[in-house]
Image (spheres, helix red, strand yellow):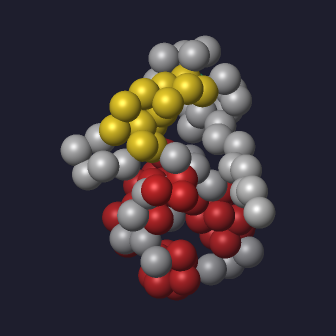
Amino acid sequence: MKIQITLTCPQCKSINVVKNGKKKAKKQNYLCNACSRQFIGDPALSYKGAHSNTITLIMRMWMRGCGIRAISVILNISLSKVLKTLEKQQVVL
Ligand SMILES: [Zn+2]
């Protein structure tokens, strides 16, 4: 059985990405041909706060009335990641 994962660039959402060597922790590094950003694919990331869909999830939960601490516990990410995301999205606390 073959499993195929389509990687998109976290910055410009392009699918035009190529392998670009490995990081120190032996994780596959990728390079976006459109905007030259380097990144590690979501499945290889050990910290969930860096996943590309985390910001969307935080914003959805916030809009549905979840508290900051609840979001942090449910998504298994740090409290400061939640706070920084809300600050960047200019949510009035
Ligand atoms: Zn890109």
Residue 22 left/right relative to 56: left
The tally of labels here is 0
Q: Is residue 58 above or below residue 91?
A: below
> Residue shown at 43%/57% (left/top)?
45
Snapshot quadrant of residue 3: bottom right
Viewer-closest of 91 and 84:
84
Q: Position of residue 89 (x, y in %)?
A: 56, 47
Q: Where 55 falls versus 46 (above or below)? A: above
37 or 66, nearer to the observer? 37
Name the quadrant of the N terminus. bottom right
Q: Classify 79 as above or below 4.
A: below
Q: Nearer the viewer, residue 29 or 82?
A: 29
User: Where residue 82 appears, x then y in whole percent?
Assistant: 46, 64
Residue drawn at (73%, 50%) of the image: 4
Instruction: Note whether residue 82 is visible.
Output: no
Q: Which residue is located at x 62 percent, y 80 percent? A: 66
Which residue appears farthest toward the right when viewing the image? 1
Which percent across, then down, holds residue 93?
50, 64
Position in image of residue 63 (x %, y %): 71, 67
Name the residue at 47% across, 84% down: 73
Q: Is residue 65 above or below residue 32?
A: below
Q: Is residue 41 visible?
A: yes
Residue sitting farthest toward the front? 1
Residue extending farthest to the left is: 24
Left/right placement of residue 9 relative to residue 30 reads right
